[in-house]
Amino acid sequence: MKRVKFFSTPDLAVGNYLNRVEKIILNFNENIEHAINDVLELYNCTLYIDNKVFFTQWTDEHKEKLKARCKIIKGFIARYFSSINEMNIELIVETLHWQYKEDFLKLFVQYHLNERIDEKIFANILTKNLFSITQVCQQPQLVKHYEIVVKHSLLERPSNAELLFDKYIIDSRANKKQLYFPKSLTKDEVNVLITNYIDSQEANTNYLQLIINNHNTKEFSVTDEHRWKAKKRKESIEKELFSNSAGVSFEYNFVFKKDAPELVQHKLDGTVLEIVYDQTYLEQELEFENILNNFIWIFEFIDSNGRINFVNNISTRTSIFDVIQLKAKRDYPVNEAFKISETLTDASMALYYSFLKKQNVRLEDVLEWFFKVYLKEDFAVSNYVFTAPSEGSSYREKCRDILPEIEYVLQQFKCYVDYGEINHEMLALSSSGLTFNQVPSIIKNKYIYKKDILNPIFYHLFSDQTLLGYLENPEKDSATFYDLLVKHKVHIDEFKDYQRTELQYLIDSNYISINNGFLMWKNPARIKILYELYHYNVISMYRLSDRLQAEVKLMHQENLVVFESSLFSKSEQDLFDYYLNNSKFQNGPQLRNKYAHGRLGNVANSNEDINYKNYLLILKLLITIVIKINEDFCLYEKVSHSKI
């Protein structure tokens, strides 16, 4: 039978283990012989009780009985560890089950075995690989007491450089276990370790990319030589890896078709996705306002709630690679879903830009019309300035010219929100730049964000890491509890005992109710709001129905959500920062910085294809800014009229 292991309170294995935990605790007998794995299983059993992981049917009296038994077990564990010494420790460690090694080291520290085990014995244990250096570095007291031994072991293998990246670079959400290193570890020693790692056969392309992108800090830095060597090494590994590999490709085809049956039609054939646009419609709709609307309704740059469609949504997972992909603390989360949406919108942008040119329509003229004519005529906003790059300039020059225009577009909008007019003289005197999170909205309480108090509910309703969607019934089994209730009629008796604790939590929290034994949503409106917040991180308040707005206001009174007001949502702010700057994210194109500071490199300077691609990306971002500004004015009118 599988031994008990405690991972965390909400872990999937809780229900499966709890019956065995109860049995082991109640049947504990100190007088029978216990091997080290038996002792550590007992220790894990006590963790369940210490963390108050109980079945709902357990009475208070039964819980107290288990707690009392755990006190006895803890005394036995302490006596067992007091018997470990230099004579028997290696024999004991050699029999350790892999899942209990970290527990052993934790208790090694707790029961002061370091006072009885000298450095030579501990070094021998590490030399035999009975513990990994990673496991040791999770215990700060071990690192401090056996500093020379740990340092030698750390520097011995180039692959241990990955531990430095795990601690200082990789996002802590992906790397939950804290690591500690010897204080005597010098910067020169670290640099040598990184160099050796880059040159080693153990070098991993994911970690090499972290070196290339790394934003140096006081805690951890790499040299420019490290970046260059890591780049060349990564290219070499990838060339060798893929030279003889056919791989699996996915193809996108974008087609204009006369008199197509639909405005947009998606056809999936195996690994080929064909997107067909109605050419006849697009040729007829060449008015500037309709062209901008096409980016919403045809090319889907914006969703029905006014959110930019090609931002990264953290909750979205499309493949196992999203889970295992290494992400630095300052990386924008580029997962597979983001790459797909990026590819689709980039391709549609290129397609439509070229199409409009053939129709003798310059997209840049459309953008100038929006700022100079449309805003004045529709919203009485005067003096908006925007100068598009000249038609005859190179794409490198177009990129360089349009980026400052984008910044000034946002500065003018902020000025209008702050003062009710655009004052170019005042803007000319300003010496400060403008970040995307500083651009305000005309509307108060525009965006809704969740508070952390909702995280447990999100986990139970929408996470595929729970077992609440699994009934051991192939006809109903679902990835999440939300999917299960939306798609099927489910009776309470279909759930196992170990699932009842989580179900009771949802019942007690008034998210589900039971009617004649069947589960149903207690408040469907609230569930809809939670679904949107979980999957998109934000909701635009005034694009909701009156009923949903009323529910949001109630949630705000209950301190579950918070309102904020800005032109761009937080996810959208991050998107612009990712593409244009390096102030927040280190893995983006950094287009503004590169064109402003002439750091394009020889290839981009001489290759107009690269500059053309970058220009279309910049135009895509500018179009979304135009759409967001227009939306702000439209929503402001809607909100103002509703209050009259």
Image: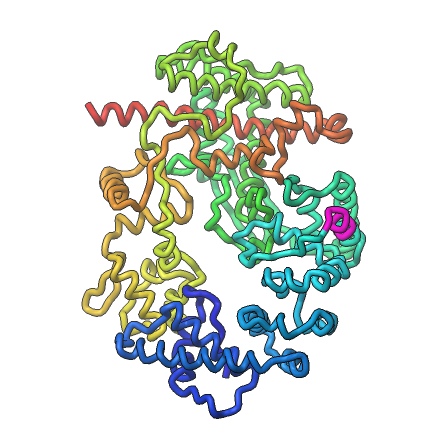
Q: Which one is nearer the viewer's eye here, 542 or 440?
A: 440
Q: Which one is nearer the viewer's eye here, 217 or 86?
A: 86
Residue with the most extreme bottom position: 32
Give x and y (percent) for residue 202: 75, 59
Task: Determine the main secondary structure of the stretch shown in magenta.
Answer: helix
Regarding residue 23, the answer to whether it shows in the image is yes
Against 323, residue 119 (above or below) is: below
Regarding residue 361, the answer to whether it shows in the image is no
In-image side of 137 versus 176 (left or right): right
In-image side of 533 versus 155 (left or right): left
Give the colouring mode of the picture: rainbow
Q: Which one is nearer the viewer's eye here, 100 or 361?
A: 100
Residue with the most extreme top position: 425
In-image side of 498 versus 136 (left or right): left
Give x and y (percent) for residue 503: 31, 65
Give x and y (percent) for residue 139: 59, 63
Which residue is rendered at x = 51% and y = 36% of the image? Answer: 574
Q: Which one is nearer the viewer's eye here, 145 or 566?
A: 145
Which residue is rendered at x = 34% and y = 72% of the image? Answer: 54
Which residue is rendered at x = 45% and y = 62% of the image? Answer: 465
**Residues rendered magenta in the picture:** 186-193
Against 35, residue 445 (above or below) is: above
Give x and y (percent) for residue 499: 35, 70
Q: Quadrant of the C terminus?
A: top left
Asked whether 187 falls inside the magenta stretch, the response is yes
Q: How many marks?
A: 0
Against 158, residue 341 (above or below) is: above
Residue with the most extreme front position: 115
